[in-house]
Image: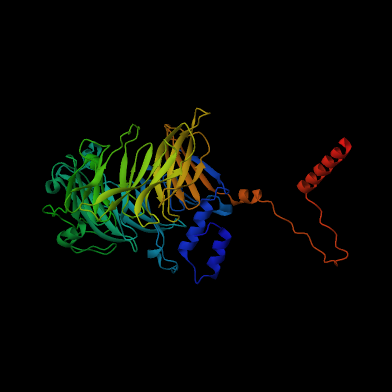
Amino acid sequence: MSSNIVLSLRSREISFGASYRRNLAIIRELVTDKRIPFKKLWEKSSKHPICYDGNNIYFDNYRSCYIACGALGLPTKLYSLPPCKNNEKIVDALLCQCSLEHLPVQNREYRGSFMALTADNWLVRYDIDTAEVLQKVYLPPTYRFKHVSNNTALETIVVKSIQRRSASFLMQRDDTEPQSKLMALGVFTVFPLEFVCFLEIDKAIFGNDTCDANIMQEILITMHHSSVVRLYSFERVLAQHKVFEAKLGQPCVQWEGIPGSQPNGLPFNVVLDQMPPVLFEVRCADHNLQLGGFPWHYIVCPHGNQSVFQVRSLQDSEVANSGVLAYVDSSGIDPDQARFHPDESGRILHSNGRKVRVLSLCSKSLPPAVQECYTIDFMHSENTRQEIITTSSGRRVQKTLRYSGASDCHYQCVQGIDYENETDMLYVTVAQRSRVHSHSCGHVLFYCNKTGRLERSVPLEGVWDEDSDHLVEVNIDTIMHITRSPLRRFVCSLYRLDHSAAMKDEVPVARKASTRVSSGDRQPKRASNRTQLLINRHASANASDEAAT
């Protein structure tokens, strides 16, 4: 890919059809161009948490929505929901937007939706652009639901209740109900919104030490006080323990009431009489389990040690070669982290407050080995990458390539690491303490996801308060910085590429109209200032020599 934007656009025009990858490569060249600065365009503060999802910014507990790229390229208010009572406020929300390019207006079930979970147990589906209420579903009143998440992207979602062990809920429940019921999980399809099932997590079935549960990627996950995590097949649970079907708004013979309406809400149509077969079981610290890699592996922290990670095979739980990940100089306040790369390449991100390592699994050896792709070291201000090169004689040797780091500052601390999939860049948020000033400032560093080369460093305006919580998200050419102060004051700042500033630095060259003349009338060219100065100096030197003679 050429770094010249004009040549890239010209090659795109003469090529056959539109290439999405080529367009993203051009955008990446613009983002990494240091001549085009990131400018702070907008800032807004709030007393309530601020959420940034996709291209929308939500304020006032999801009741006010701003589109990030609105009129004149600035965030513009899209809609504002009417005021509501405290028991009707939105406690959690999820953005569900289909990727269909053409959609009939009358087909309301496939339109982009904003799923909101209210405090009075309603699941409300709003239109993503107009906030029109498209559908409302009343959840079982015997539980209080406060979490909604994706099970499988653009297919199913999961609503999760709070645990019944809270004292406030125990005072409100019926004494005749069994106390072994811990929580409830409900599953819905998204396009269209339809009811799949509701099931209860019973300690009598999954164990008395069960403390939490969830459904992700068609896997039922239970967590226990003994630091054990168990995985079950949710598809198998549905096939064997679903007793009847129920559709929203239609009477159900096996259950009293209309599903999705008051006062009964929805039925629990999955009834477990025994624990399902366990697919996988592991003991780990803080129930922190990561699955991924090629071939399949998992990452866990041994019980009682949160700074050491083990990469084990999912087939036989054997530790991979060099699969124990630990930093010798780990002295940061925040704990170390190890997870699989968000780009779904099977690589591993291992980081602490000073370093970021990108590792890969090599399946050629048995057991598979963990190899280092590159390291971003902020203490030494240089990045290293191991690469296999071939010499002129045909011999393959391993060479260490070094790239310059972020900047020469006195102190650096990694605040966050994430991946921008459309431009294929890894961005790291760091807090830097200058050698001159005593305060810290924030920087967003863009790295090439494949090589680890530093592409660009973008400073964030203002003083970086280390006592506040910071969240930085990058969406192509937009940087969103959300802070939360210890006094619960939320501030949202938006940065975007400023092409006008780059155009001001370029001085246009004006072409003068030329007149064709004959060879006899042609005048000699006028010498430039530098050439004329050299001629004058030469003439002065000759005059001085003649005077001396």
- Position of 261 compared to 114: left or right? left
Looking at the picture, how far across and down is residue 377, in whole percent? Answer: 40, 39
Figure check: 492 above or below 26: above
Q: Residue at x 19, y 64 (%)?
A: 253
* Extreme residue in the top direction: 438
Nearest the camera: 27 or 542? 542
- Position of 241 compared to 469: left or right? left
* Extreme residue in the bottom direction: 16
Looking at the picture, how far across and down is residue 464, in whole percent? Answer: 47, 34
Nearest the camera: 490 or 316? 316
The way the protein has been coloured in the rendering is rainbow
Nearest the camera: 257 or 129? 129
Q: Would you identify the image quadrant in which residue 363 lies?
A: bottom left
Q: Residue at x 28, y 38 (%)?
A: 326
Marker count (numbered): 0
Nearest the camera: 241 or 409? 409
Looking at the picture, how far across and down is residue 350, in whole percent? Answer: 33, 43
Inspect this view and state whether residue 206 appears: yes
Q: Quadrant of the C terminus?
A: top right
Inspect this view and state whether residue 258 appears: no
Looking at the picture, how far across and down is residue 240, in whole percent? Answer: 15, 61
Figure check: 531 above or below 517: above
